[in-house]
Structures are given as structure tokens and as C-alpha cells.
Amino acid sequence: MQKIKKEQGITLLALVITIIVLLILAGITISAITGDNGIIGNAGQAKEETVIANEKEIIEKATVQAMGNNKYGNIEESELQEQLDKETGEEKTEVSDAGDEFEVVFHESNRYYTVDKDGNVEGAFEIIEDKYPGDITVGKDGNTLDGSEEKPYEIWCIEDLMEWSKNYSQYTNAYIKLCTNLNFKSELSYANSETKGYGDVNQDGNTDSLIKELQSGEGFKPIQQFSGNFDGDENVISNLYISKQDNAGLILSLNNANFKNITVKGEIHSQSNNAGIISQGGKSQIENIMSDVKIYGGVAAGIIGRCTGQLNIRDCVNLGNIESTSAVGGFCGDQFTGEMLNCINEGTIKSSASGNYGVGGLCGNTGSNNTESTQIKNCINGGTIIYDGNRSIWYFGGAGGITGLNRQTLIIQNCVNTGEIQSTSYAGGICGMDLIYWQNQEKYELTNSFMLNNIEKVTGSNEAETEITVFEMEDIQDVITSLNTYIQNNKLIEQGWKLWKIGNDGRLTCE
């Protein structure tokens, strides 16, 4: 009898263990099927990827056909729509002109793609509906935001930008995040592009639809000032248009701020004063900005027109052409003090100034007649620099690949100029005119910087660079070796410097 009980006990224990094992296996199986990386999830993702690939193929076929039907090889909106209708059936897609590209919407999947004028297709992009346009304190789905680092105010549409501009003082010291790409010429970037509720935004005396108001007259009304943290989250603002008599910029005054991670494309124009993505500012960190903006102003630059305090600018690129009647540079026009690190200019920089103004690939004028120092490190100019103002004995204007005119303590390290320098006044491959050198003050340090290829690219007086060595090097690999050796020997990677390399386009660039 005792033996039988013992055997039954063992059997019960085995049963319990078996059930536990089965439950564990069931849990694993369910997770494998329904989890984030489960069979169902992967199947859904694979299906979506297949649909996206099919949509892109449809657009590519329609684009090729549309270009082939045009005797100049151009893409016309109506022709592209006609070809898409043949591929998908009518009213399945919708084409709209969004400036430098067309947008193709697939209604069923709620996705859109872009097609540039050369026929290149990008996407897929989700069509986002902001349920609370013009209120950046509420997320697109209704979640409450307080402007903290954990819950930054969110920009989802053009109307949200309009709100920031209108009530800028309410968002001082806040965290603000751009959550999606915005194209001022795209209906998809507005909650309602046809609204006239904002009135005569562009100050031309008439009230039109919002999308038209922002493309004529004075265009978008700049954000007056910002002291806080703005994160573009790697998004793009395109077809921005601003034209003012006075200061012009997306932001007019930036102080005690962080401004980072955004690409801006468009046109900014000031008749007589500062112009740039930021009109003027100081004591701020500006990081990872790409400017592809055509800019004109009294003092002008791709990033910030006039510096009013020490700035840190790093990891920025300027592609836009910039023209000025005063000081002008790829990143800062006038009075730059602070540090510029890992920046590249490819735009043409031009000034018709007559006076003590500089034209530079990175900075127009460095220094501001005070004790603050300026450091420019690990930077490249590849754009053409043009100074065509009137020279006289009283003027010290200059054009340089890195800086046009220096007024104070300046350190240039590890910089390269590959661009052509044209000047009716002083000129240099690295620095056009150094007033400190002329005053016999030893406040200018140039280290490991190069003017590539032929020094004859510099046309103008080189008197200001008498004591400055500019190396002519035909082999770009020698330059890369020299620059990288300097960085590694001085352990500068720990300070945020980047090593150099030849990019996919064959140009010198940072890693």
C-alpha cells in the first residue's frame, strides 16, 4: 500500500512539471507569433514593405513615361497624373506641385512619395494629421505637453510654426521639437492650406489663402526671439520664404539657446540689415544644421548674420549662395567670437561692400574689438569667395577661404580651402585681411591649414598674409594624412574633432 502511494506521488509531480513545461512552451510560442518580432508582426511588416516597393515601382514607371512624353524630358504635373492613373486607375493617386518636387499621394495606404525634377523618387512618408493645429502645447493626438525636456512642445504643421511666431514670448526657455518635414509649398504640411483665418500675413494689403500668403510679399513672419532648446530631429523645413526691410530670419534673435538637427531650404532676404536662418544671436550652441538657403542682406550668412556674444557652432554645412552689401560668411557674417568646429561651406559667398568688411567661406568678420577670442577648427571652404567692393586707403576689406577680416585674437587650426578667392581688395587663401597683424599684435595663430592646389586661385592683394604660410599640395591624400596626424597626436577626437576622409563625391570631408 505504501509503495502504491509513493508511485502515485511521483506521477503527480511529473504531471505538474509537464504542465509547467507546456505553459512555458506555450508562452514562448505565443510570443514568437504575436510579439514585436513575431511571425504575425514580421508578416505584416513584410506585407507593408511589399506594398511600398510596389507603390515606388508604379511611380518610377509613370515618371519615366511622363519624361519620355515631354520633348524636353521634363516632368509635368498633369502628365505624371495621367500616367499614374493608367497604372493604378483614376482617383487612386493624387499629384501636387510642391516647389522643387512633386508629391504623389496613395489614398488607400495614406502614404506619399516625392519626385524631384530629375525623376528621383523618395519615400514612403506617412501622411500625418494634426488634430490640434496651431497649438504646440498639445501633441497631434491630444497628449498634453509642458515644454520640458521630457515633454517638449511639438511642431507638426505650418500652423504650429505660425503659433510659435505669433506668441513667441510664451515659449521662452522651453524645449521645442520639430516632429516632421515641413514644406511651405506643400498642402500636406498644412492642416488647412486654404484657410484665410490668419489674415494678411505677408503685409501686401490683400488676404489670400495661407499657402499663398507665405510665398509672396514679406512671406513668413519671423520668430522674434528664442532662448531655449530647439531640436529639429533631423527634419527639413523647405521652401521657406522671408523678405523684410529690416532683419530677416526664421529666428531674429537667439540667445542662451541650443539650436540643432535641422535642414532649412528656401530664400531669406533683408533690404538693409542682418539675414540668415538666425538673424543675430550669441551665447548659444548651434549644432548639426544644414543651410540650403539663398540669402541676401546687409550682413548675411547661412546660419547667423551677426554674432552678439560667444557662439559654439559645430557640425554644420552651408550649401546656399549668399550675397551681401556688408560682411558675409558661410556660417557667420559679422563679429564672430567663440568656436566653430567641423563645418563645411560649399556655397558662393559674395559682397559688394566698401569699407572694413570681410567675405569668408566660414566667417565674414571675426572678432568684435573686444577681448573675446575666436577659434575655427577642422573646417573646409569649397565655395567661391568674391569681394568686389571699392578699395581705398581707408578701407581694409578682405576675402579669405576661412575668414575675410580679423579684428581680434584668432586661432585657425586644421582648416582647408579649396575654393577660388576673388577680391578687389586684400585676399588670402585662409585669411583675407588681419588687422591684428597690421597692428603688430601677436594674436593670430595659424596651424596645419592649407590652400589646396594652385595659389593663383587667389586674385587680389596678399599683403595681409605676408607672414602666413599657405601650403600648396596637389595630392589630397597628403592633406588628409597631415590633418589626421595632427588630430590624433593632440588627442583632439576627445574634444569632438573629426577625422578627415575623401567622401563618396570625391571631395574632402569629415567622418
Image: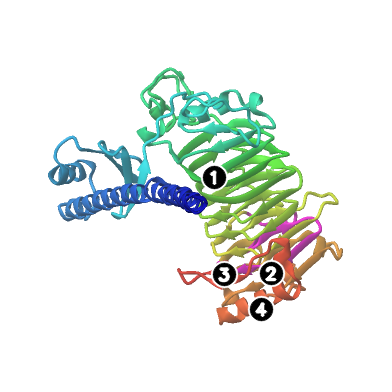
Q: Which residue is mark 4?
A: 482
The quarter in which the C terminus is drawn is: bottom right
**Which amino acid type is marked by label 4?**
Ser
In the depicted structure, whether residue 461 falls above or below residue 188: below
Q: CA distance from mark 4 to mark 3?
A: 16 Å
Q: Magenta span has 414?
A: yes
Q: CA distance from mark 4 to mark 2?
A: 9 Å
Q: Which residue is mark 1?
A: 233
Decide: few, some or many residues near mark 1? Use Cα within 10 Å; few <14, some 14-19, many ≥20. Answer: some
**Which amino acid type is marked by label 1?**
Asp
In the image, the segment drawn in magenta is 390-419
**Which amino acid type is marked by label 3?**
Thr
| Quarter location, residue 279 | top right
Q: Position of residue 65 (x, y in %)?
A: 17, 53
Total tally of numbered discs in the picture = 4
Q: Which residue is mark 2?
A: 414
**In the picture provided, is 139 more to the left or to the right than 195?**
right
**Which amino acid type is marked by label 2?**
Asn
Question: What numbered label is drawn on residue 462?
Answer: none
Towards the viewer: 280 or 37:
37
Decide: few, some or many residues near mark 2? Use Cα within 10 Å; few <14, some 14-19, many ≥20. Answer: many
| Quarter location, residue 340 | bottom right
Helix, strand or loop under label 4: helix
Q: Which residue is mark 3?
A: 418
Q: CA distance from mark 1 to mark 4?
A: 34 Å
Circle 2 or circle 3, nearest the eye? 2
